Image (cartoon, rainbow, N blue to C red):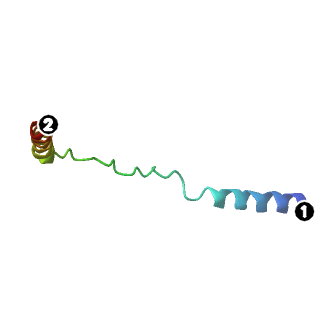
Amino acid sequence: MKKLVLAAALTVAASAAFAGGMVEPVMEPEVVEAATSSSAGGFIVPLLLLLVVAAVASN
């Protein structure tokens, strides 16, 4: 009789562990980087080139 009660108690405990059922996985949103363009390179590079030319010309 004790074995029957123990088996019933284990059955109830085991079924309570699976009471929630399957849960759909939660996917995190994908991070998308926006491509940025800068016009600083179009201004600084010719300015530096002009400074180098001026330095060479002054010697």
5 lies above or below 55: below
The amino acid sitting under disc 2 is Val
Q: Which sits in the foreground, 31 or 50? A: 50
In the rendering, at what x and y percent does residue 45 appear?
A: 14, 41
At mark 2, the secondary structure is helix
In the rendering, at what x and y percent does residue 58 appear?
A: 10, 41
Q: Which sits in the foreground, 41 or 48? A: 48
For residue 22, side relative to residue 38 (left or right): right
Few, some or many C-alpha atoms within 10 Å of disc 2 (few <14, some 14-19, many ≥20)?
few
Q: Residue at x 33, y 47 (%)?
A: 30
Mark 2 = which residue? 56
In the rendering, at what x and y percent does residue 41 appear?
A: 15, 43
Q: Nearer the viewer, mark 2 or mark 1?
A: 2
Toward which corner of the image does residue 55 lie, by quadrant?
Answer: top left
**In the rendered image, which quarter contains the N terminus?**
bottom right
Mark 1 = which residue? 2
The answer to whether residue 1 is visible is no
Few, some or many C-alpha atoms within 10 Å of disc 1 (few <14, some 14-19, many ≥20)?
few
**In the rendered image, which quarter contains the C terminus?**
top left
- Estimate the spatial distance between the alpha carbons at disc 2 and disc 1, rounded to whole Å: 102 Å
Toward which corner of the image does residue 35 lie, by quadrant?
Answer: top left
Q: Which residue is drawn at 39% across and 52% down?
A: 28
At mark 1, the secondary structure is helix
First along the sequence among labels 2 and 1: 1
The amino acid sitting under disc 1 is Lys
Q: Which residue lies furthest to the front in this view?
A: 59
The answer to whether residue 34 is visible is yes
For residue 55, side relative to residue 25 (left or right): left
In the rendering, at what x and y percent does residue 4 appear?
A: 85, 58
Q: Residue at x 58, y 59 (%)?
A: 19
Q: Which sits in the foreground, 38 or 27? A: 38
